[in-house]
Amino acid sequence: MTQSTLSLPTIDLSLWQDQQTPDEFFLESLRNAAHEYGFFYLKGHGISADLNAALMAQAQEFFSLPMEQKEQISMVNSPHFRGYNHAGREITRGKADWREQLDIGPERAIVEDLKGKPAYMRLQGPNQWPATLPQLKATVLSWQEQVLDVLRRLLEALALSLGQARNAFHPVVSKTPYQLLKLIHYPGQHGSGERQGVGAHKDSDLLSLILQDNEGGLEVELANGEWLQAPPQPETFIVNIGELLEVATSGYFKAAIHRVVSPNSGRNRLSAAFFLGAQLDATMPVLPLPDALANSSVGITQDPDNPLFSQIGQNTLKGRLRSHPDVAARHHSDLFSAVPSKVLHHA
């Protein structure tokens, strides 16, 4: 059942753009949005509409390429989980998602000698770029850089809203945090059934930021089990809480369960989803919340199909292995005996 009588809160980051310390109304609004919904609109972010439009135009051009050109940069060829996936290749809760996507991370050198190093170091490496779209790389990297700055500022505000020092999350995001951008195309589907564009799931990062086109379909699950639509709003992003912030706040902030319902046949949906993780070699700190907030926490979610790890690399690798079993089988089969079998599936 989809709930439509409520709407997600909107946070205006411009209230803090020119201030060292945001006012109490801003902090309270941000904390409540993150605590009660785990999902909110973000406006006043400072990223230009022109850059957002350029990114979506490049995404449209990429997904319009012939399949053989897109498959030249197929993710299954990348041990770092970078590249193209056609619709039906990614799995959520045991079912195929009906979306094609291009996964892009920061441009970093491959770790050549992995002997004796943690398995999560395999996630670092180069992207795959389509040779026929030379402007895509520059547009993507510019957008990523600006979004990363926005989310770092938002993390500072979230820390302050919890009664912490502004730099509470700096140790895990100030240098080289794990980050991922997905350019996503949801083709229309026939019928009035479930139409899983992407199934219900949580994100394994700190914060996720979503740029939507004008086609709806994104929904977030409320505490009562109903689904709240998150339709596009002009000049806003959607931001949602990930699992690492749930760990850091002992469950005061909950990683939001969300999904995308495919558009009707004959329609399409484009989005860009940016996921800010933390440095792979770090361990997520658990913040000492004030009593008034700690008493409102129900603890970290206990889901045997989706264990949460405070070690960043472990939690991140878990998410990639379970979402992309074809990449896991080709490049990381040696890890299967070391990782609980349920972790290899998208819970």
Image: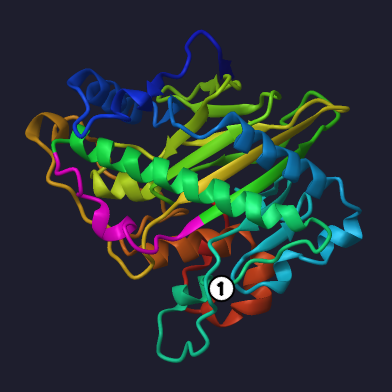
Residue ID for mark 1 = 125
The magenta stretch is: 164-179
> Taking 60 as reference, is 300 left or right?
left
Q: Is residue 249 magenta?
A: no
For the point 76% across and 65% down, which residue is it?
74
In this picture, is 221 found above or below 303?
A: above
In this picture, is 167 found above or below 283?
A: above
- For badge 1, the amino acid type reads Gly
Q: Give the main secondary structure, helix, strand or loop, of the magenta stretch.
A: loop
For the point 41% across and 40% down, which residue is it?
150
Residue 106 x/y as whole percent = 53, 62
Asked where in the image residue 211 lies, by quadrant, the reply is top right
> Taking 14 as reference, is 143 left or right?
right
The number of numbered badges drawn on the structure is 1
**Closer to the camera, 248 or 9?**
9
Q: Is residue 17 visible?
A: yes
For the point 48% across and 36% down, which residue is it?
257
Asked where in the image residue 157 lies, by quadrant, the reply is top left
Q: The residue tagged with tag 1: helix, strand or loop?
A: loop
